[in-house]
Amino acid sequence: MRERQRSTARPRHRICPQDIVFAGVGKTDAEINRALAADIWCFNAESAEELVVLNELAGGQNRRARVALRVNPNVDAQTHHYITTGLEANKFGIGLGDLPAVVEQLPSLPHLELVGLHAHIGSQITDLAVFAELSQKLNELQAWLEEQGHHLPHLNVGGGLGIDYNDPDTNPIPDFEAYFRTFEQHLIRRPGQQVHVELGRAIVAQSGTLVSRVLYVKRSQQTQFAILDAGLTELIRPALYGSHHHIQNLSSQGEIQPYDVVGPICESSDTFGRAVPLTETKRGDLIALRSAGAYGEVMSSAYNLREKAEAVYI
Ligand SMILES: Cc1ncc(COP(=O)(O)O)c(C=O)c1O
């Protein structure tokens, strides 16, 4: 592909600190200090210990940090276990059993201001009933916090809405209407209260394609391999979670045949798909790995001394 001229113009929009939420189960002191100095809008805190550290660092800067408690509501997202984040076995969030002690601790942390409740229970969720269940858990928690005298200006329901990896052309846009309707129907909002969402994949995944070239077609007794010049270093999802991406040969109109589509990396998990039906494939053909706009380039690595793939924006 020809490289496009990169724009040197300054971006027209910048993200204001007041629009930034800092999430993550392992925030470093340096990161927290930087976020405090920038006066970001909110820290989503994930443990009692993090709250203590946050309080200390905010005090050191003579500030009061706004925090939301990321709770682990023990709701099964019915998705791959590597991208399930809202079960008690997961490292994320404050467990429901630990919440009373955390809330009791808050008055002793004068440099924190509780402004919200947060939950992110997983990714690639395709069953909207999961979000209804999450709403019910948040309703109960909110009522309980109000009994303790905490009134929250916002609720953050996380992200997690899934996309159609099998058929990106028929379903390029997830059913956002049904997603928002689910919260509208099940999440009880207080007057003036804001609801925040953190959708990631649902917004960007279908807008990216990994385009790769076939280096070799190798035929063995059992199968034929299409060996690509892209591998798990460019798109790790199949190797990491066994996930499926729709694969197409962009160069060929030939007969459909099954290929094991693999990368060049020194790992057998460097496989994009087994027995993938592709039009007859030969060295030099371009192969599209679809739905690579989320958790693709951002999870790429330099393993095996790989150079970063060119990103082209159209
Ligand atoms: C806290 C949090 N919010 C939102 C997201 C976005 O998730 P998704 O891309 O599934 O919408 C993630 C993903 O890791 C996350 O960790």
Image: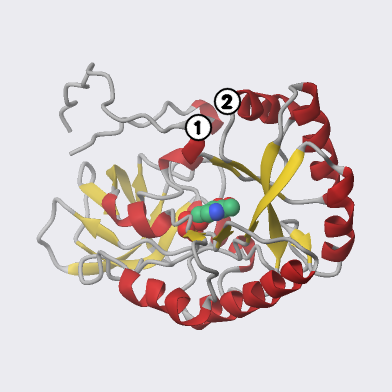
**Vertically, is 285 above or below 85?**
above
View extreme (top): residue: 8
Residue 304, can we see it? yes
Q: Which quadrant of the structure image shows residue 313?
A: top left
Tag 1 near tag 2, CB within 8 Å: yes
Which SS class for mark 1? helix
Residue 175, can we see it? no
Residue carrying label 1:
17
**Residue 273 has which mark?**
none
Residue 198 horizontal side relative to residue 81, left or right: left
Please provide percent x and percent y for residue 215.
31, 41
**Distance from mark 2 CB to nearest ligand 1 atom below 8 Å:** no
Q: Amino acid at mark 1?
A: Pro
Quarter of the image that includes the N terminus: top left
Of residues 231 and 4, which is closer to you in this image?
4
Of residues 31 and 103, which is closer to you in this image?
103
Quarter of the image that includes the C terminus: top left
Please provide percent x and percent y for residue 300.
48, 38
Q: Earlier in the sequence, mark 1 or mark 2?
A: 1
Please provide percent x and percent y for residue 110.
82, 39
**Vertically, is 115 above or below 43?**
below
Instruction: Give the total number of marks visible in the rendering.
Output: 2
Please provide percent x and percent y for residue 114.
70, 50
Which SS class for mark 2? helix
Residue 52 horizontal side relative to residue 82, left or right: right
Residue carrying label 2:
38
Q: Amino acid at mark 2?
A: Ala
Residue at left offset 75%, top offset 30% = 58
Of residues 300 and 99, which is closer to you in this image?
99
Q: Specify few, some or many for label 2: CA neighbours under 10 Å numbering under 14, 14-19, or 20 or more.
A: few
